[in-house]
Amino acid sequence: MLGGLFLTFPVLGQEADQSWTAGLQQMDSSQMTLLLIIGVVLLLIVIIMGVMLYLLSFLMSVIRQDNPALAAQPSWWENFKEKFVTGKMKPIEQEADIQLDHSYDGIVELDNFMPPWLAYVFYLSIGFAIIYFVNYSVLGIGKTQMEEYEEELAIAAMEEEARGESMLAAIDENTVEFTSSTAAIEAGSELYAGNCAACHAMDGGGGVGPNLTDEYWIHGGDIKDIFSVVKYGVVEKGMIPWQDQLSPEQMQQVSSYILTLQGTSPANPKEPQGEKYEPNIEEPLDALGEDELGLEPAE
């Protein structure tokens, strides 16, 4: 039972350390000053109590010297030690009465009673176990380890979601990347149908706006170029900026969907506009010649 009691301390201690650290981080300078003052006051109280106990012990010793009748009586410390620490031990002359019959290699064991402090700890552990059981298993007030674990998982999931939303909110024309996830493409398709199809046609073949299915682009055909056009618009040609109506994530989704229209066959494709876009593909070093690498031929 004592082992079970001690095993609960690390869990309780870990939670207490986390809450204590979080509390300190949230304190301002005035609160920290107040906490420091309280700590100093408590330390002074402990020191004063220690000095008072020392003076009391010194005073009792002086009184015992002046009054021989009190000298034979045990001191308060001896009474406390006998009642709560060691118990009333039998004199050496009476140890034969509590000797066990069996000896171990000539060593005789005494049938001593349990020290009072250990008995009190045992009783406290029983009381703690009852309170613990009623609190967690009967009344359900406290959280079990599994409930705490599930709560921590839920908190971690919310923090992860918040980090993801923060990262999505930070997407701009310099950091945007093409996303090929089914959910993102479907969301981009819905955004395109609701906002872009009126000028570019549902199949991307173009109308008032240019054809989005061919290889020719007026402002560049990279994901960053498309995102920038969607975000800032082309006001002189009638395309409004969408940064006030769409989130960065939504602009990424619709830009990615537009790239999926490349190579498709619209019903009424508009003539190409702009320049042919060729993606920049880095050629591996082993495919380059010595002249391109700037190497001198070996003699």
Image: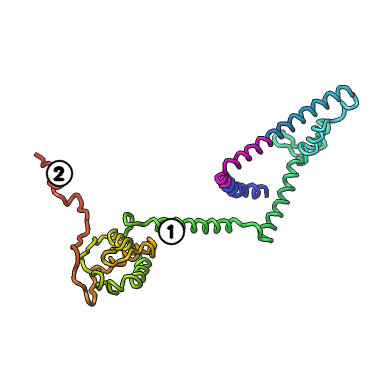
Q: Secondary structure beneath disc 1?
A: helix
Relative image position of residue 78 (x, y in whole percent): 80, 32
Residue drawn at x 86%, y 25% is 63
Relative image position of residue 81 (x, y in whole percent): 78, 35
Nearest the camera: 218 or 44? 218
- Residue contact between numbered discs 1 and 2, judged by CB atoms under 8 Å: no
State the extent of the magenta-drawn residues as a range.
Answer: 21-42
The residue under label 1 is which amino acid type? Answer: Glu
Residue drawn at x 52%, y 59% is 154
Residue wearing tag 2: 294
Residue drawn at x 33%, y 61% is 231
| Residue 298, above or below 278 | above
Residue wearing tag 1: 165
Q: Quick one: quadrant of the C terminus?
A: top left
Indicate the quadrant where residue 240 lies: bottom left
Indicate the quadrant where residue 74 lies: top right
The residue under label 2 is which amino acid type? Answer: Gly
